[in-house]
Amino acid sequence: MKDLLATYYFRPKEGVDAAYAANAIREEQTTGTWTDLSTVNEETAYVHALDGSVEDLVELPDGGYLTKICFPHEIFEKGNIPQYLSVIAGNLFGLGKLEAVRLLDIDLPENLAGCGPKFGIDGIRKIVGTEVSCRPHIGTIIKPKVGLNPKDTAQVAYEAALGGLDLIKDDETLTNQTFCPLFDRLEAVMDALDRAKDETGKQVLYAVNVTTGGDRIVELAHKAVSAGANMLMVDVLTAGFSAIQALAEAPGINVPIHVHRTMHGALTRNPHHGIAMRPIAKLVRSSGGDQLHTGSVSGKMGSKAGEVIADNREITKPLSYLKPVFPVSSGGLHPGKVAAEIAKLGTDIVLQAGGGIHGHPEGTTAGTRAMLQAAEAAILGIPAREYATSHPELAAALAKWGDA
Ligand code: 3PG
């Protein structure tokens, strides 16, 4: 199919017929408006090619409805994701005939897909040297999330790398502030990772947060890569999908892109209104994000396990034209939660801990080791508490945070 199929949940306002409401969404997002138009006549009847169609309408036990709307591919400007969103997630959210409406999913056809991830799961595993291993990647967010200067940030990165993890990243609110200028931080962290590599032999990725205005992000990313960055990070919902796309398509930016979804709760949290994570995740894959935060099953952010599992399946399922995205589970994780994450999300996952590493009683290196030990235990099928009897770093973590 060449057209885009969008699935919505909606609740009509009292007294509004459901079929009328579904058609109002289609109409508003395609060729129509609230009344008939003198501009659509026999001579301009060709515009009906963009009418689209309501393909399905099902009543749900909660009184809401599920509908699928088919949008003709010609209504989209290929590759222009802001424009895609104006069609599938535009004015409809404000329609007065609807009490609530939520974009649940999209079937994005190959002819409308972007370039996709340059690296994907296999490409990232290759850089880090874990391609023959079936363990999750372990990552950390430097904490505190803001406030440290470049030298102290680099020291934390060094200690984390000594523990053997795979990824270190900036937090979503750290960009290029005066207390920690981006290029000073990048230089210091990459130097620290080189020193750690001399000791461990292991290449660690550092996702430096280049989120900035659309007029500056590509130039900033180019400079970051020239200064040694081996991964870039973008806050997709604040910067926009085109920020990822611009970096993924820019010649010379040959490093993976780590995508944070900060602000997503404003869209995803209400089960009846907004935009579910699924379409966001699919658009990130299409735009060229290599890693994406999709939620955890046991962390602090209140995700629903079933949705996280299904979203991860969607962005990792084989497609001939898009590489899989490496899903990231993050937010409130610590070694005691690793078994639950692996049990539900599998091993093709990045398990990230900020507080769960830097809050370890013996410090960051021990915190990193404890996360890795917890992953080893889960993969071996050994309860964390049992494994901890011969792994002191894990024992100290479990003593502080428990194993649930
Ligand atoms: C994230 O980016 O997911 C958060 O900064 C995670 O931090 P935490 O592990 O301390 O909850």
Image (cartoon, rainbow, N blue to C red):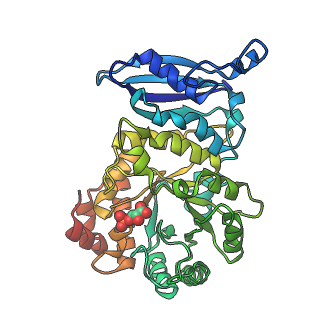
Percent from the top left, x then y, of residue 97? 42, 26
Q: Residue at x 28, y 74 (%)?
A: 392
Q: Report the number of numbered marks.
A: 0
Percent from the top left, x then y, of residue 146? 43, 76
Image quadrant of residue 138? bottom left
Is any part of residue 204 visible from this angle? Answer: yes
Q: Residue at x 54, y 17 (%)?
A: 55
Please state if 281 lies on the left or on the right of 319 as rendered.
left
Query: Taking 354 as reference, is 56 above or below it?
Result: above
Quadrant for the C terminus, please: bottom left
Quadrant for the N terminus, please: top right
Q: Residue at x 74, y 15 (%)?
A: 45
Percent from the top left, x then y, of residue 351? 42, 59
Query: Taking 254 as reference, is 46 above or below it?
Result: above
Who is closer to the viewer here, 170 or 12? 12
Percent from the top left, x then y, of residue 148? 44, 83
Image quadrant of residue 310? top left
